[in-house]
Amino acid sequence: MLIVISDIHLAESQTNCLGNLSYNRNLPAIVYRNYFREVALTAKQNGVKKAELVLAGDIFEINRTGFWLQDNLRPYLRNDEIQTGSDEERRILDILDAIAEDERVSETLEVFRALPSMFEMPIQMHYIPGNHDRLVNSSQAIREKARTFLGLESNNNLFPNIYEYHAENGPLALVRHGHEYDPVNFGMDVTTLEEIPMYLPQSVYECPALGNISTVEIATKLPIIFKMYYTENKILRDENLRSLYQRLIEFDDVRPSSALLNFLFSTPGIKKKETWRILEPVFIKIIRDIAESPYLVKRLAETADLNLAQSELIKGVLNLDIWHNGIPYWVIKRLMRSVSKNIKLDRVEQFAIKEKCIKEHGSGIRCVITGHTHSPEVELLTAKDGIQKYYINSGTWRNQIPSTPDLKKFGRLRSMTKVFIFGSEECDSEFEWKTGWSFDFSTKLGYGSDYGY
């Protein structure tokens, strides 16, 4: 039996604190404890002899943390640029410690370490890093700390980039994190390939991507700069400032990403012009910080792999003279309208169907499982000669902020996706017929007015 979960983004919460307010986005440990109790019962009822649990990436939130904004250290380095005993290695180790020290995370990690005693059969855990925890593979000390936190066996090996699940009759499922299909968050554009090989070069997984830079220099920095500019005391006294601060923290929970600007400008009780009056100095500060850093501009150009036209556009945006007198609100409105009119929601299955193991009729692989997008789904890829092959997205265990189709209104969802793959000898007891293999996929979505900060 294969169990897949991804994108739980265990994160430190101390750098986002505002006075006595804690903006903790981690789920309480009881969610994980109840889930694995249910999984253990399901496995027992289906005669499972051995369980394989795959943590399919973005388990530790190493990128989006204020720890990277304390000085000039940044996470967009190649893994092999991080030397043993270096400041960069120490920073990553400190981030992992801060994550594990969070009360909710600490209790959650105890749940993972206790899994062998919860299951009545052997259970083996596998960890595949994603784009937000890519750096967990950058040194032996970092890998060892992650293994200790999760209760994994100590060894000197790199964490793998994929997991190929074998049932009784051979290979059955391929698990990736899924950032491989996303050129903004992966060091190679595989979307242009006619066929995607199962094993991509290790060096590609070690490269920083454009998403690493935007995560730190924009998403992470927005609330930090906001708090520095307006001060904690002023934000705590002003309801509008406090509401906008929370929206900046929630920024990367918004789906689709094309709705991000609208999310900021739809803060209840604040008119759009007033919102921009408050946010303008924060955005200008972020643009100036990028433009005034030769290292960052160089990294941006190298990482983004831009063509000439794109490079000139970036240089134009970073031209400090443009922002000397501020950014007119009409520019923001036009940008919002332009983004809303040009929404392109790429379907991930169009890339999964190009996987070599899916295209090859005799590969044995019956499904490709990824996370990354935070959008749980199941899609039939092919059905030939009675052999069905599927794409399954394991979603996220994070809170989500979905938008209406016009990108103007927003809600809040709590999400938890369950993916079980059964081999031929583990037929699901809920069905009376044999299929040779089967899968259970369910998404538990709950509506909530807030995140319980």
Image (cartoon, grey):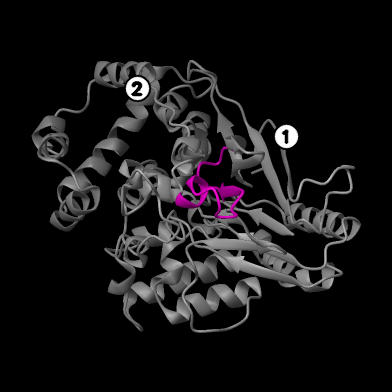
Measured along the vertical axis of the image, is residue 192 above or below residue 328?
A: below
From the viewer's side, name the closer residue of 107 and 166.
166
Q: Nearer the viewer, residue 274 or 192?
A: 192
Q: Position of residue 188 (x, y in %)?
A: 31, 52
Q: Residue at x 56, y 53 (%)?
A: 362
Residue 355 painted magenta: no
Residue at the image position 72 percent from the left and 34 percent from the top: 446
- Asked if residue 365 is among those painted magenta in the image, a careful observer would answer yes
SS under mark 2: helix
Q: Which residue is mark 2?
A: 339
Is 332 left, or right, of 369 in this rendering? left
- The amino acid at mark 2 is Val
Query: From the image, which quarter does the N terminus lie in?
Result: bottom right
Which quarter of the rendered picture does the C terminus lie within? top right
Instruction: Tell me the distance, in whole angstroms, between the alpha carbons under discs 1 and 2.
Output: 29 Å
- Horizontal and vertical percent position of residue 118: 83, 68
- Report the magenta residues as a range: 356-375
Q: How many marks?
A: 2
Q: Which residue is mark 1?
A: 446
Most frequent secondary structure within the magenta stretch: loop
Q: Position of residue 93 (x, y in %)?
A: 46, 74
